[in-house]
Amino acid sequence: MLDLNFVRENLETVKTALDNRNTSTKSLEKFVEVDAERRRVIGESDQINQQRNTSSKQIGALMQQGKGDEAEKLKAEVAGLKEKQAELERQRDEAENTMRELLAALPNLPASDVPAGKDESANVEIRRWGTVREFDFEPKDHVDLGESLSILDLERATKIAGSRFAILNGAGARLERALVNFMLDVHTTEHGYTETLPPFIVNRNSLFGTNQLPKFEEDLFHLKDERGFALIPTAEVPVTNYHAGEILEAKDLPKYFTAYTPCFRSEAGSYGKDTRGLIRQHQFEKVELVKLTLPENSEEEHEKLTQNAERILQLLGLPYRTVVLSTGDMSFGAAKTYDIEVWIPSQNTFREISSCSNCTDFQARRMNLRFRRAGGAKPEFVHTLNGSGLAVGRTWIAILENYQQEDGSILIPEVLHQYMNGLEKIEK
RNA sequence: GGAGACGUGGCUGAGUGGCUGAAAGCGGCGGUUUGCUAAACCGUUGUAGUUCAAAAGACUACCACAGGUUCGAAUCCUGUCGUCUCCGCCA
């Protein structure tokens, strides 16, 4: 959420930013209108309250002096204010709610160094790592490889759940678990993150805090429960909200969290693309990285977080490239985003395996997550960052496809051997 | 799931209808003292909104949350959420 005063005082800046994000600027006109109305109503209603408070105090004093008649007269007067007050309160609630809705629907402002552009074609590759393997045979995709090795069963997953679900078996399931453990170990021991295992179900407040609500309601799996529960679409939701509503001390920042969770997304099925295989599923596994930082450090921390995610691919020996998303391709809450894309041989292209965003104070304001500098200064909003470190399912795909042998077997990257009980190769 | 107790400021904790945005203590900040540290003493110390060019100031709201009673609510009533204790059940 953007700051109300900032929007009021920088309408043009906000307008430009919205244009760059392909977002309608229409709501800004309403913003100005409602803002004026809101302030007018607040002024009036505060004034009525003041009158009421003053009179009530006088009534108290009069009663003590035994001047019951005068007190009664005043009582009648105040009672008359009540109706007016009720109406003003109603108007005030309405104006403030509308204001909140308008603000909550505005996306974050892109950082100044983000390339302007209307979609992913304006994204800019900033680095590339590893060498794409030259196959001297026709490489298979992960579905063919996985099914022939009996480590992937899509058909039965469809039977017991539906399309966009998968079952991993034997060494395939073990590989998934190995990846989770490997990633968590690297992030906790080498990168200084604290491992956390959060709830996989969250309430609506948390979903508002990390911008899933109100705009992306239909992307979530909701539980049939009057508490407004939903399955988490990413660990970003429970982990970033961990300190929501709190005032932290500056000396305790930055905080680094890493969490393994399953992720549940309803939207995955609505796109006609990636219908084959594990690329786009209703349920997938992810190791997430989350940081809470001081405002002045978030850019640097963003770079480091992205490199922490890249490190996993380097250790696994998987070629990738890193791109900075253009203004038109960034997600709602991000000020700047790096996507890390891993090489997928069967598609002869790089596919997203991690998205690392600096959300600046956007989410912190939504969840009222603040910190205080030493010396009793005013509380300020922290900056929140998140990134996948990495999407485990897609890493699984990348390993199968990049490490496949002509006979259909899979060589397991050396760093995973200890996590695979010494297994070096998956074969029939 | 059943029974009971309880939710007050950064923390502990007073406060059962007006003089309470809220005692006291701790912590924080500023100062005095001191060779330095500590102690002691003095002062100060919530958040947000409106107004104002800004500051100062003024006003409003906030004692879990949402309603209600009343001229007036932290205090009374109702609902919700949460915490604790005992019992039951379960992994």
Image: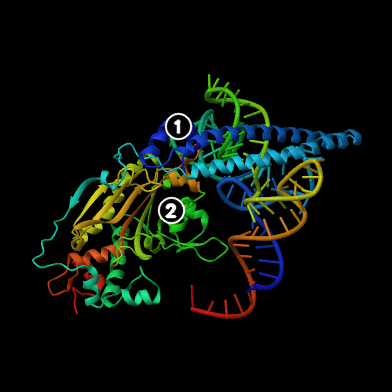
Give the quadrant of residue A406. bottom left
Q: Say few, some or many: other residues with alpha carbon within 10 Å of mark 1 (under 14 / 14 to 19 / 20 or more).
A: some
Q: In this view, does A182 lie above or below A409?
A: above
> In this picture, is A107 found above or below A156?
above
- Asked if residue B87 is positioned above or below residue A60 in the image, the reply reads below
Of the 4 image quadrants, the one containing the C terminus of chain A is bottom left
Q: Tell me the tag on residue A355.
A: none
Lower position in the chain sequence, tag 1 or tag 2: 1
Residue name at image x 46 percent, y 53 percent? A241
Q: Position of residue A31 (x, y in %)?
A: 52, 36
Q: Mark 2 points at which residue?
A: A240
Identity, as a three-letter code, of the amino acid under mark 2: Thr
User: Which residue type does callout 1 highlight?
Assistant: Leu
Camera-nearest residue between A10 and A22: A22
Residue in front for this viewpoint, A271 or A71: A271
Q: Is residue A66 visible in the rendered structure shown here?
A: no
Numbered label attached to residue A11: 1
Residue A195, image x and y in percent?
38, 60
Chain at numbered mark 2:
A
Classify residue A113 as left or right of residue A377. left
Q: How far apart are marks 1 and 2 (CA)?
A: 29 Å
